[in-house]
Amino acid sequence: MHELIDHPCVQHKLAIIRDVDTGHKRFRELATEITKFICYEALKNIKVKETVVQTPVAKATCKKIDTDLVVVPILRAGVGMLEGILELVPTARVGFVGLYRDEVTKQPVSYYQRLPAQARGGTCIIIDPMIATGGSTVAAIELLKESGAAKIVVVCIVTCPEGLALVEGAHPDVPIYTAAIDDHLNEDKYIVPGLGDAGDRLFGTSQ
Ligand code: PRP
Ligand code: URA
């Protein structure tokens, strides 16, 4: 299952973040803003628990997010989405999965992982701006499943049919939320039109 967040407020920001003339400061701000909107949708089915709050007038039965929610950025570019989701769920725990795409094979190479114990049996939200071939997302999902995650949700900013097919084929139980499903991958396995190298644009390492 995947859901495209086609809201005008998201699509407007997406147009700016794609623009080659958007510098790293604005790119980071937009990544945070877009992530917040996508996660607002992606988190609509997370577990809540009832709690009773005393208002100045009476007792109110309310709902609070039932953590343990674990946010898992895929290093490095996933870090650019962390602030946005933590603004929505400040109590979430954070685990890190370090993966980079080998420049020649384009296959994900794992170099770091650190997950909170609550990932076992908990809900894990993987964040990464780009699902291109889908290899990195599949590797992260497999790691989380091996770690005992009960539920996994993926949030990205841009993906493409090839990436969706790989992830959904391997893990049909994992929903994907995205602001864009682009046209195709080029010969370098970059998303077209995409937004370029998300990590470089976020952290200013391209120029
Ligand atoms: C990018 C991106 C994803 C991956 C997507 O990371 O942030 O993790 O590529 O490609 P895939 O779907 O084909 O696996 P990259 O490997 O460039 O590392 P970085 O975040 O450290 O820049
Ligand atoms: N990683 C990126 O950052 N961008 C792409 O288009 C593909 C992989």
Image (spheres, grey):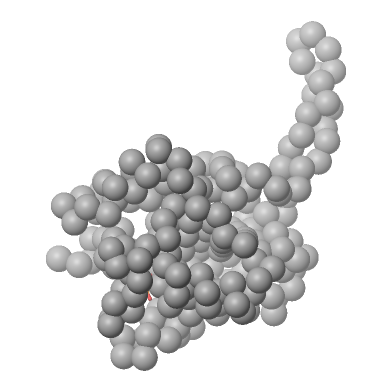
Q: At 71% from the left edge and 63% from the top edge, which residue is drawn?
A: 151
Viewer-closest of 129 and 159: 159
Q: Is residue 2 left or right of residue 75?
A: right
Q: Residue at x 83, y 36 (%)?
A: 50
Rendering quarter of residue 10: top left
Q: Quadrant of the C terminus?
A: bottom left
Name the residue rendered at 37%, 62% in the picture. 182
Q: Nearer the viewer, residue 45 or 146?
A: 45
x and y percentages locating residue 190 in the rendered image: 31, 73
Q: Position of residue 42 (x, y in %)?
A: 59, 50
- At which x and y percent is residue 180? 41, 56
Which of the 4 quarters of the picture holds residue 189? bottom left
Q: Is residue 9 visible?
A: yes
Q: Find the residue positioned furthest to the top.
A: 57
Total numbered labels placed on residues in the image: 0
Residue 113 seen in render: no
The N terminus sits in image quarter: bottom right
Image point (69%, 75%), residue name: 145
